[in-house]
Amino acid sequence: MKKTFIASILAFGALTAAQAADIVDTAVAAGSFKTLVTAIQAAGLVDTLKGKGPFTVFAPTDAAFAKIPKADLDALLKDKAKLTAVLTYHVVAGKVMAADVKAGKVKTVQGSGLTIGTMGGVTVDSAKVTATDIAADNGVIHVIDTVVMPK
């Protein structure tokens, strides 16, 4: 009886650990989105991106944020309204997996449209998609190599 109880506890723990985390926790765990997570916190979007969703996030890596001059990035991180607009420009409502991506305009949570290209690899405005289908329990993350800015 004791062995069965312990085995049940271990099995439950393994099931819990195997479940996907939300968008924010998935980004934190990946380790290459530290600047993005800092920006999400600065904009006050943590609770939103931990919400029900589903969301499709085109997530710029730390290297993508490093392309922005430091003074410009520092100013952006201090301007909550502009930062929120930039971050929500990277988010599309719904869960769009790579196999479902089609070229054209897609409306972002920010309200503007991103231009998706599929010739020679997938692009989002001027950014190249470098990894796809990172599952989260409230959506999916696709990695991009450049921070895209709303018009």
Image (tube, rainbow, N blue to C red):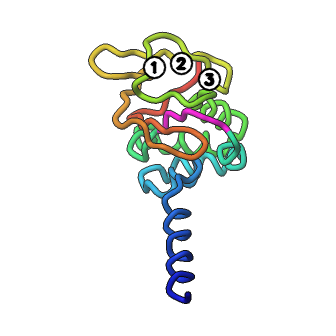
Say left or right for 130 vs 80. Answer: left
Q: Which residue is mark 1?
A: 125
Q: Nearer the viewer, residue 67 or 84?
A: 84
Label disc, if present, on residue 108 of the rendered structure: 3
> Is 90 included in the stretch rendered in magenta?
no
Asked where in the image residue 133 lies, by quadrant, the reply is: top left
Q: Position of residue 63 (x, y in %)?
A: 38, 44
Decide: few, some or many residues near mark 1? Use Cα within 10 Å; few <14, some 14-19, many ≥20: some
Residue 19's place in the image compared with 144, above or below, is below
The answer to whether 137 appears left or right of 144 in the picture is right
- Amino acid carrying label 3: it is Thr
What's the magenta bit mostly, secondary-structure-wise? Answer: strand
Which secondary structure, mark 3?
A: loop
Residue depicted at 55% across the width and 89% down the height: 2
Q: Are marks 2 and 1 in contact (CB under 8 Å)?
A: yes
Question: What residue appears at the point 56 percent right and 53 percent down from the top-left corner?
Answer: 21
Indicate which disc, 3 or 1, sits on the residue closer to the N terminus.
3
- The quarter of the picture where the C terminus appears is top right
CB-based contact (under 8 Å), mark 3 and mark 1: no
Q: Which residues are magenta?
A: 53-59
Residue at which label 2 appears: 114
Q: Amino acid at mark 2?
A: Leu
